[in-house]
Structure formats: C-alpha cells, structure tokens
Image (cartoon, grey):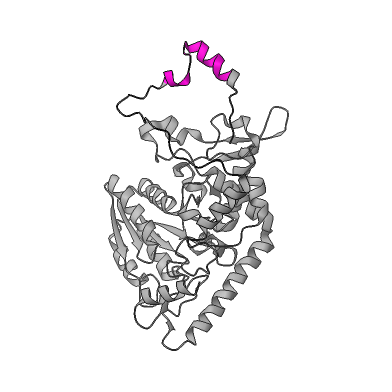
Amino acid sequence: MYTPHTARDIEEMLAVVGASTLDELARVPDAVALKVKLDLPQATAELDLLRRFEHLAARDTGIAYRQFLGAGAYNHYIPPVLGALAMRGEFLTAYTPYQAEVSQGSLQAIYEWQTYICLLTGFDIANASVYDGATATAEAAIMAINATGRRTLLVSRAVHPNYRTVLKTYADGLDAAVEEIPDTAGGTTDWPQLAERLAAKDVAAVIVQSPNFFGNVDTPDEAGRQAIKASGALLIGVVAEALSLAVLQPPAHWGADIAVGEAQSFGISLAYGGPYVGFMATTKEHLRRLPGRLAGKSVDAQGRTAYVLTLQAREQHIRREKATSNICTNQAHCALIATMYLAAVGNSGLKAIATENLRRSRQLATAVANVPGFRLAHQAPFFNELVVRVPGRAAGVLAALEAKG
C-alpha cells in the first residue's frame, strides 16, 4: 500500500482546518453508521495474495485460448519493450498537455505518430489520434458534411456494425441521413448499386472499409471511383485492422479522400475492448476541417528543433460552438504505445508481421475448406479474416471450439 501522508502530515493539515481527527471532516450519520467491526481476514503476504488472484483469474476465459473471432479486436504479439517504456511516468497520461510546448517529449511522440500514420495511409496530414476507429469514422463523416454542405451519408453494410452504429448516433445529432449500401454475395460492397444511388448528387460521403468486416479487400474499381468523384461526394476509407496497411494498397492510392481506422493492432492489448486508438489522415485540402490536435515541427529563436500544437484556432476550446468538431482531446497514451511499436518493429518488421498473418490466414482457409461440411463463404481476396459456412448452427460450432480451448 502506498500512503503518501505521514501521521505528522495529517496532524499538521488537521490543525490548519481546526479539526482533531479525520472523522470530523466527514461525519457518518448514526442512523447509517456501522456499529460492529467488519469480519475481515488478516493481512496477506504479497506472494500469497498474487497466487490467490492468479487462482481466481484462472477460472476466467483468458487470452491463452486460441482466438479466431477478430471483428475489430486482434490478439497480436506485443513486444515486452512497450510495457517497459510506455508505462514510464514521463509518458503515462491520456491527455495532450495543456501547456503544450513545455512537454517537448510528448509533442515529439505525437508528431512521430502522425508521421507513421501518413506513411501508412499515403496522405499528407494526420491528427494526434481520436478515441477509436468508430469515432474516427464518425468524425470523418462530419468533415464531409462540412466540406460539401450535404447531409446524406452512404455507408457500406460491409463496414463494421459497431462503426455504423456510432456513425448513426453522430448523424442523428446533425440531422444527417445515413443510408446503407448492401454487400454482395461475394462479401464486398455492391458498387454498381452505390454508383446508381450517387446519381442524385446529394451525398456528402461514401464510407467503405477495406479489409471489410468479413476480412475481404473491398476497394472501388475505376468506374466506382469515377462515380464518386463525379457526384461530388468524399470517399472515406476505413481500416479496422491497421496491420493490413503494411501489405495492401494504402487508402490514398485507391481513391480515398480521408483515411480513418483503428490502430489497436500496433501493440495495444485487447483490454476487454478498450481503450484503443483511432487514426485520421487526409489531404492538405481538408486540413482545417480535421478534428483533434495537430503537432507540428518548427525551430525556436536559437534555431533548435521545437514541437508545437499548431492550427489550434480551429479547435473547440477556441472556436466554441463554431468548431467543426466537439473532440478536443485524444488517446495520446495509446498513440504513444502504437508509435513505440512501429518504431520497434521497423518498416521491414511490420511488413514481415503482416505477411506472416497473410500466410497463416491462407493456411487456415485451406485447412477449413478441406473439412467436410465446411466451406469459405466468399472467394474475394482477404487479409487476416475470413467467413466460414458451417453445417448446422454457428453457435454450436463456437461452443465446441471453446470446449477445446
């Protein structure tokens, strides 16, 4: 137990406020005060306590189980160096600093995060991060609404369902309409139907995910890109499995105007679903509509490198109700972990990890296809996830798999 105040400290503080005991500061009414002592066990040695909690934890389903569910949360290997560095007191905060330029180390880390995201997505600008992939998607939709003046959003049904739910929540507050474009039997967006819907030229954004919720590569062909461009809508590319960016074409190269997604794969543990870290990247054209904070690199009066929070006039704490977004903080600590991960594995290491995931997913697909009664649901190219048709009910198969660990 860490007790920061000594008995003498407490006596001195009580003397200042004119009290003799701590009980006088917060009196419990007699009607609700406990009249008997609690029947608590004796103090336990640290090692015994650790073993007790390990015994309790062993009753749960832990990450020692082989996991094949995916769907936006991925149990990738995390190098031990991340825990050793990211938990240091110099870094351990979930906020960008309010007296920003005092914390040059934190700003440099954010700047490096932004640089990595730009390299991976192919865009010019990235922000300091947002809460997760779902909120990044919704924030990008707000950018599109503000850029086009339109209030209709087209989202592929192959986009993660949680992302679509968050998008609808945001849209409801903006009086914007969200229309879903169905996916085909092949497990990708119905691009011809989407192109037909765009003919009305009233759409602010087209939102697609690649790899999509089924794991399939789902990018528009040339006809789809031309239809989106001709309609005046922005194309938002969502990436829920950021590791795919190491081997697949980046969003900027397949026509996206804004890239958003989830970077949990970069060294962040499953952690019961969060906190994770969302990324956003775009072109210089949309820089002033980009929400969240931006770290910039400059020089001071002595010519030394200096990192700053730049373009703050567009943010909520300055523009108030006129700001284009209500997000004014970010998941800086998770972004730091992701940055450390990318620095630790390097360019070739990240590509090797992604390639190994690709190889193993192909190996799994081949093995599954050879099991009687099982077949792959789609034939589209996929990255790290695939949909399997099973005999009977899927719930029964999942229960059998869980029983086998």
User: Magenta stretch mostly in which secondary structure?
Assistant: helix
x, y percent for residue 326:
39, 39
Quarter of image, res 193: bottom left
383 and 303: which is toward the camera: 383
Position of 236 relative to 379 (above/below): above
Locate the N terminus and report the quarter of the image it occupies: top right
Position of 25 relative to 236 (above/below): above
In the rendered structure, does residue 245 fall within the stretch colored magenta? no
x, y percent for residue 11:
55, 16
Please provide the residue range marked out in magenta. Answer: 9-25
Q: Is residue 366 left or right of residue 318?
A: right
Position of 77 relative to 328 (above/below): below
x, y percent for residue 215:
46, 70
Q: How many marks?
A: 0
Residue at 49% in and 82% down: 368
306 and 60: which is toward the camera: 60
x, y percent for residue 188:
40, 72
Residue 260 at least partly seen: no
Residue at 55% in and 59% down: 265
Residue at 45% in and 80% down: 379
